[in-house]
Image (cartoon, helix red, strand yellow):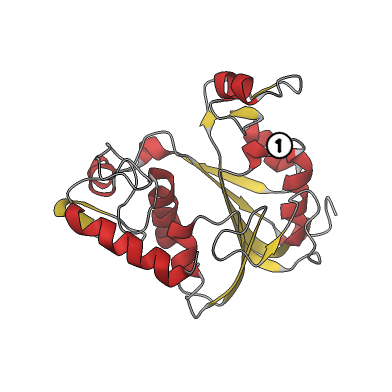
Amino acid sequence: MHRWWIETLLALRALPFVGTKYTCPCCGWRLRAFTHGGKSLKTRYHGYCPRCNSKARHRRDWLYLAEKTNLFTDKLRVLHVSPKYALSRRFVNMPNLDYVGIGYDSRPNISMKVDLVAIPFASDSFDAIICIHTLEHIEDDRQAMRELFRVLKPGGWALISVPIQLDQKTLEDPTIVTPEDRQRVFGEEQHVRWYGYDLMDRLTASGFQVDLDLAQDIDQRARDKYGLLDDENVFFCRKLAANSELRQ
């Protein structure tokens, strides 16, 4: 679907939701409620923004990127893994970004189809990486993490978020293969694990220096204003210059 048509449909859907209760940081739209999603005009608590289709996780990540990174100020080459339209619709037009979107399908703003365990870019190619709710789909996630580390420049950073339960260890079982069983065990038909607190160990083993930014630490007023959830945690990963030769 052409981008102009997507934007037209979103704009039309957004009109009935104009209000003052919430603000979407991804598009700036002020709204009375979030939508259930798709073509539905039903409301849903902390659901989709009717104007840009952002989920709560995208609004959370946008705020983190805007407040705690140089994404909006510096000249950066950015790799966006499986980009969601709510974010990529803005990123692709930002003049300070050399934006590269990669994924498995033909959604808008994807430059090329890429297997994340074998990224076809040279080492030290990107200043920043955005990878939101993708690793839980990949069987060899450790190799994917090593690839993300490899293509990131020394001094660069990666924002990574996944479905996670911090009170338990990562749950995965390669014998669980049917969509029905994956839905039952991992929460979605295409997921191959539920991440736990040991995700930080996996990222660190790949070479990253990792900081965990907890959703529960966000001010309650901000959560209410932007329609945020309390379980969308951000792993902010850096590639230190001293570690640039590791894991490659």
Residue at the spot of label 1: 202
Instruction: Describe the element under mark 1 as helix, strand or loop.
Output: helix
Q: How many marks?
A: 1
**Where on the picture, by quarter, is residue 20?**
bottom left
Quarter of the image with the C terminus in it: bottom right
Instruction: Identify which residue is drawn at 26% across, 61% down.
Output: 12
Q: Callout 1: few (<14), some (14-19), or many (20+) C-alpha neighbours within 10 Å?
A: some
Taking 187 as reference, is 200 above or below it? below
Taking 229 as reference, is 83 above or below it? below
Taking 86 as reference, is 228 above or below it? above
* Location of residue 80 in the rendering, given as x and y in whole percent from the top left corner: 60, 60
**Where on the picture, by quarter, is residue 127?**
bottom right
Query: Residue most toward the bottom?
Result: 95
Instruction: Identify which residue is drawn at 78% across, 48% down.
Output: 117
Q: Is residue 20 left or right of residue 7?
A: left
Taking 33 as reference, is 45 above or below it? above
Instruction: Identify which residue is drawn at 42% across, 56% down.
Output: 62
* Location of residue 46 in the rendering, given as x and y in whole percent from the top left corner: 30, 40
Three-letter amino acid code at disc 1? Arg
Q: Is residue 102 left or right of residue 52?
A: right
* Location of residue 23 in the rendering, given as x and y in whole percent from the top left corner: 24, 55
Q: Is residue 104 left or right of residue 42?
A: right
Q: Depth check: give the residue in front, 203 or 132.
A: 132
* Location of residue 42 in the rendering, given as x and y in whole percent from the top left corner: 25, 40
Note whether residue 132 is visible. Answer: yes
Note whether residue 169 is visible. Answer: no
